[in-house]
Amino acid sequence: MNQDQQSRSLLNGNAPPAAPAIPGRILHCDADFLAYQSGHDWEQTTLNESIVDVESRIEDLRVSAQAEVIVLHLTLGTKGGRHEIARVAEYQGKRKKDTGLGERVRALRSHMAYMWTPTTSPHAQYDQEADDSLCQAMWRDPNAVLWSIDKDLNMVGGMHLSADASEIIHSTWGYGVTFLDRSKSSPKIIGKGTSFFWHQLLQGDSVDGIPGLPKLPNGKPCGAVGVTNYLKDATNDKEALALVYAAYHKYYDLEDPYLVSWDGVTYHATPKDMLLEQARLLWMRRERGQDVLDFLKEVNS
């Protein structure tokens, strides 16, 4: 049984009996992902059936986290400027354009945006992504719990409800740890804390169309194995930044600093510009409107 099948089983009325809610505990939920989970069978189910399914998942998550209230974070507007930032490659440009699924997901998001109940509170975002909103909520409240299957949120500290809703996992706001998972056919980077952010800056994120860096200083591609080996000696953000910047400087050490964007626009760029673009796309914003440049300056001070 794969991870999604496990989560689907536990989040469809099959979760084990849970302890009573902990007074004051709030679960911040990636409701965008729930919309895709409940909407994936759009060809075989009606909208009402999908709504029943998503409401069941929401309650199962709340009970599993022992939360009094579950907050549904939803992306209903722009992506916080990420489409405009992305020049090397189109942001989320490779995502499948499935009209039927897209319509079902939008309908479920709209439904959840008005799901005000004694135990459910919508938190729709119109000028940033729900991922950023989730990060900000966790940054503000050390006693909150986060649920999401999105790996980008691995850099967010605090208590995380596991993907299958079976346990609470504690993560760090500091450097954390990243390692290579060889249990599958293709090695995969697993990480927590800002360590995962630095690894992503090199490897990129194929799901969101974030290319990272094509090649390491040793000439090897920025795959999971190469990136993990390259950053294995870094023990903090300052050391990781130095290694990542060295890799970007080596790759983009061009006599002519003018590059062509994915949509054909010529622009001026230095190695620092290229690193900053990828960092702005990958960084989970701890405060609304935060620029990752502030974090990078703090690390380099």
Image: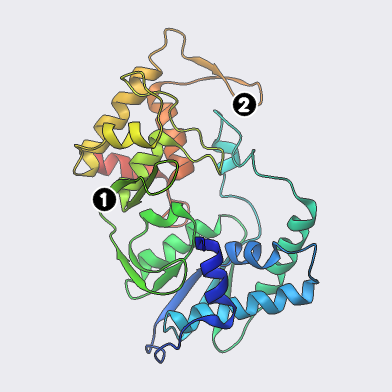
Give the secondary structure at mark 2: loop
Residue at position x 64%, y 74% in the image? 54
x, y percent for residue 244: 31, 31
Decide if residue 121 is in sight here.
no
Give the secondary structure at mark 1: strand
**Foreground: disc 2 or disc 1:** 1
User: Along the line of sight, which residue is nearer the eye, 275 or 201?
Assistant: 201
Residue at position x 47%, y 71% in the image? 28
Residue at position x 39%, y 23% in the image? 271
Residue 238, quarter of picture: top left
**Side of 89 where 202 appears, left or right:** left
Residue carrying label 2: 262
User: Along the line of sight, which residue is nearer the eye, 136 or 147?
Assistant: 147
x, y percent for residue 31: 58, 67
Q: What residue type is labelled 1?
A: Val
Q: Residue 177 carries which label?
A: 1
